[in-house]
Image (tube, rainbow, N blue to C red):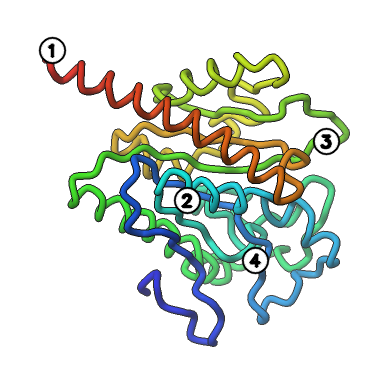
Amino acid sequence: MSVAKAEADGAAAPVAIVNRAGAGAFVVLCDHASNALPARFGTLGLSPADLQAHIAWDPGALGVSRRLSGLLDAPLVHPTLSRLLVDCNRAPDAPDLAPALSEATEIPGNRDLSEEDRAARIALVHTPFHAAVDEVLDERAARGLPTLLVSVHTFTPVYRGVSRPWQIGVLYDQDRRLAERLISALKSDSSLTVGDNEPYAPSDGVYYTLDRHGQARGLASVMLEIRNDEVADAAGEEAWAHRLAALLAEAGRAVSASEAGRKKTN
C-alpha cells in the first residue's frame, strides 16, 4: 500500500509526512506521535484516561517534532496511530510490539493476539511507516541532500515508582557523531540534568527505527527523550523545539565539517 493512501475503511492514512520537500540537513522521526485507534479496534479495553497516558503515546513529542520540522526545514515522518496497536519503534518480532501489559496497565485488546492479528497490525502501520521513511531518505539521496536523523520521544517523570531526574536524555548506539556534541552542549547549561543513554539505551530495544534507517545507511543519528512534564503545553513544546533546533543545527554543521575534512585527507 502506498504510504499516502488512506485505509480501505475510510480512516485517515496511518502515516503522515510533513514538509516532505524540506531541504534542511535533518529528517525528523516521531515513532510515538499519536494515541489514536481505528474505530474497529475500539479502545482495546482501556479507559479514556489510559489512552491519554504515556502508555498510549509520547505526549508532547509530535508538537516538538512539528516545530523542529519548521525551524530546521526538515521532513517529518510519523505514524498517526497509537503505539498500543503496534509499536513502530520495535522489531516486528519484538515481544512488546503490541504489549498486553504496559508498565502496570493491562491492555485487554492485545491479549492473546494470533499471528494473523499481529501480521495485520504490522501491515496496517508498521510497514507503511518504515516504507515512508525509506521513501523520504531515498528521495533526498536522489536530490544529493546530506541527511542527519533525529528521533523525538518523551518519557514519563515516574516509572514503576522511580523518579527520573533528567529533563532530557540523548540516546545513541555505535554512531556518536551527533550525540556527543549534543550531550556536551546540553550539559553546558547548569540548570539541566542530561541523560547519557538514559532513561533508556539501545540495549532496552528502543533503537529499532534509528538502527534500521540511520546506522544501516551510515547516517548520523540521534534519539532525543524529553521528560513529558517539560512539554506539557504549547509553550513547553515551543521552548524545547527552539533550544533543540539551535543545538541540532550546530551539531549538524560540526558533523558535516568533520566529514568533509575526513574526505579531503583520504
Q: Residues within 10 Å of mark 3 (few under 14, many from 20)?
A: few
Q: x, y (%) of residue 22? A: 35, 53
Q: Give the amino acid type for the residue marked by disc 1 in the picture.
A: Thr
Q: Disc 1 versus disc 2: distance between alpha carbons?
A: 35 Å
User: Would residue 200 be found to the left or right of residue 30 on screen?
Assistant: right
Q: Are marks 3 and 1 in contact (CB under 8 Å)?
A: no
The residue where tag 3 is placed is 158
Q: Give the amino acid type for the residue marked by disc 3 in the picture.
A: Val
Q: Disc 3 versus disc 4: distance between alpha carbons?
A: 29 Å
Mark 2 against mark 4, which lies toward the viewer? Answer: 2
Q: Disc 1 versus disc 4: distance between alpha carbons?
A: 55 Å
Q: Are marks 3 and 4 in contact (CB under 8 Å)?
A: no
Q: Disc 2 versus disc 3: distance between alpha carbons?
A: 31 Å
Q: Which mark is residue 70?
A: 2
Q: Residues within 10 Å of mark 4 (few under 14, many from 20)?
A: few
Q: Residue at coordinates 61% horizontally, 68% vertically from top-left?
A: 114
The residue where tag 4 is placed is 113
Q: Disc 3 versus disc 1: distance between alpha carbons?
A: 48 Å
Q: Give the amino acid type for the residue marked by disc 2 in the picture.
A: Gly
The residue where tag 1 is placed is 265
Position above or below: 216 against 95: above
Q: Residue at coordinates 29% horizontally, 33% vertically from top-left?
A: 218
Mark 1 against mark 2, which lies toward the viewer? Answer: 2
Q: Residue at coordinates 53% horizontally, 86% vertically from top-left?
A: 10
Lower position in the chain sequence, tag 3 or tag 4: 4
Q: Give the amino acid type for the residue marked by disc 4 in the picture.
A: Leu
Mark 1 against mark 4, which lies toward the viewer? Answer: 1
Lower position in the chain sequence, tag 3 or tag 1: 3
> For numbered disc 1, what is the local secondary structure?
helix
Lower position in the chain sequence, tag 2 or tag 4: 2
> For numbered disc 2, what is the local secondary structure?
helix
